[in-house]
Image (tube, rainbow, N blue to C red):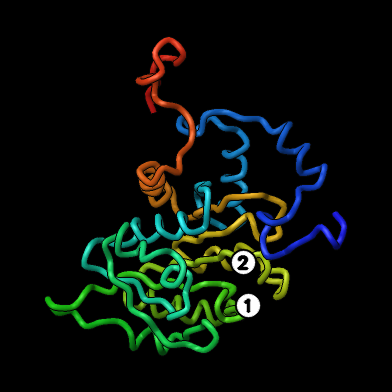
Amino acid sequence: MSIIEANLLSDTVTRPTPEMLEAMMSARVGDDVFGEDPTINALQEKAAKMFGHEAALFCPSGTMTNQIALQIHLQPLEEVICEENAHIYQFETGGYAHNARCSISLVKGVYGKMNSEQVLAAIKPVFDWLPKTSLVSIENSCNKGGGTYYTLEEARSIQGICQMKNLSYHLDGARLFNVLVETGDEAIRWGTTFDTLSICLSKGLGAPVGSLLIGSNEKITQARRFRKVMGGRLGSCHGQSCGPFCDPPRPH
């Protein structure tokens, strides 16, 4: 790929190289509804292992992986703490309220970053008239922060607060691979800092679309149901609507 062709804003605005096109044309395919797409399965297994977790789930977009993460971590009347410029607040159409039916507690950080002291101060006391604080989410790197990023030490400082207060911890890692290139950190050290991670494949990584949600087997099993109800699970019609063109439904 020549310098003129490259646009590292996102691979969605970069023309694929011949090698990318060949990989797409020759990829092994299957029905992801039944867990039978070998290419997606291999991708999910590789990502989970890379970040030190049990499982991963491929989705069309980072917005979907973030929204699924909110739904698997939160119940209605609970809340997520995030910095005021976070993608889940600024750019996901208020989906936290629509999908997870949760509220959001905003922290005013510096160039998209908040610190552990601010997170601790944002945790609400337990009263009937307040939402229950249950999740903390950070974004790395910080889009509206101009590309600023949390160091591993900063992220783990917030992790300590989450562990102390029994809160779940999610990473919107849309550009995490860019951060890893800059810092030289190992992916597994970041992965084991969080309960779930969302990573984008369309940020200069050679894939035209897609993101992965990474976490435990239990969380990803739950996430598959939310992906389905949001329309993100492509594949079979379960043998119920195609008449003679469809195989009989198979058990999951």
Q: Which residue is mark 1?
A: 147
Name which quarter of the figure residue 148 lies in.
Answer: bottom right
Q: Nearer the viewer, residue 126 or 49?
A: 126
Q: Which residue is pictured at 66% across the width and 71% down the height?
A: 179
Kindly indicate whether the residue at mark 1 contacts the one at mark 2 (C-beta within 8 angstroms).
yes
Q: Which residue is pictured at 62% across the width and 48% down the height?
A: 46
Q: Which residue is pictured at 41% across the width and 26% down the height?
A: 237
- Relative to 30, 157 lies left or right: left
Name which quarter of the figure residue 135 lies in.
Answer: bottom left
Q: Which residue is mark 2?
A: 175
> Which element type, helix, strand or loop, lies under badge 2?
loop
Spot occupied by residue 190 in the image (x, y as percentages of width and height): 57, 67
Quadrant of the frame with the N terminus? bottom right
Label 1 amino acid?
Gly
> Which element type, helix, strand or loop, lies under badge 1?
loop
- Mark 2 and mark 1 lie on one chain; the one further toward the N terminus is 1
110 over 141 or under it: above or below? below
Label 2 amino acid?
Arg
